[in-house]
Amino acid sequence: MGTATRPSRWHRLPLLIWLVVVWGALWQDFSPGNLVFGLLIALAVSYAFYLPPVELSGRFNLPRALAFGLWFLKEVSVASFQVLYWAVAKGPRIRNAVIAVPLRSRSDLIMTAVGHVLSLIPGSLVVEVDRGTSTLYVHAMNTPTPESVERVRAGIQDIEARLIRLMGSREELAALAAEVRDHDGSGR
């Protein structure tokens, strides 16, 4: 078993600041005394429970982020009306499924981002993550046929592809481009 090195104090500073802000928000008290106590708790937590640093790819595509934000708002809006329709028109007759969705990326950041995006869109919810195989298990509404299950799986893999284009590593981006070229032969 390898030895993990603890991050330096400067690398832990954003985490400590975030924990103090969360502490103040939870208590709804941003007085100096409460924040100092929150800092002591944050220091104790960060020393007692080591969290490995999140590995960032070093790239972030702002135009893709703006496009992703607009796409996400559209998806949330459309899905909200779909779920409303299903609840009113179909009620308990709707068929749901838990679907295993293998992801391309092995990155914890991409896997987490895909899971959060899915869980924020009405009609889907991540129920389990298999980090070893990069597989998400997703509860999806209105999936009565194998074709609808495949549409959901393809939609989730599309979310992952959008996030890879937005903030994935150069290797993930190249693999995605190669996959697209192989799939449709267009070399997009």
Image (tube, helix red, strand yellow):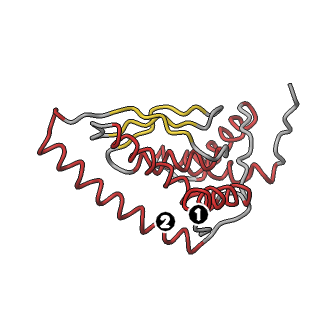
Residue 154 horizontal/vertical position (percent): 45, 49
Q: Residues within 10 Å of mark 2 (few under 14, many from 20)?
A: some
The residue sitting at 49% across, 47% down in the picture is 116
User: Tag on residue 185?
Assistant: 1
> Considering only order in the chain, which callout, 2 or 1, is on the residue closer to the N terminus?
2
For the view shown, which residue lies furthest in the bottom direction?
A: 63
Describe the element under mark 2 as helix, strand or loop: helix
Cα distance, mark 1 to mark 2?
A: 25 Å
Figure check: 72 above or below 109: below
Quadrant into which the N terminus falls? top right
Q: Is residue 122 left or right of residue 42?
A: left
Q: Position of residue 133 (x, y in %)?
A: 63, 33
Query: Which residue occupies 34% across, 42% down?
Result: 147
What element does badge 1 sit on?
A: loop
Residue 15 image point, x, y percent: 68, 49
Q: Are marks 1 and 2 in contact (CB under 8 Å)?
A: no
The vertical placement of 53 against 184, above or below, is above
Viewer-closest of 40 and 13: 13
Which residue matches tag 2? 68
Instruction: Using the image as rendered, state which of residue 56 and residue 52 is in the foreground.
Output: 56
Query: Seen from this angle, which residue lies furthest left?
Result: 89
Q: Amino acid at mark 2?
A: Phe
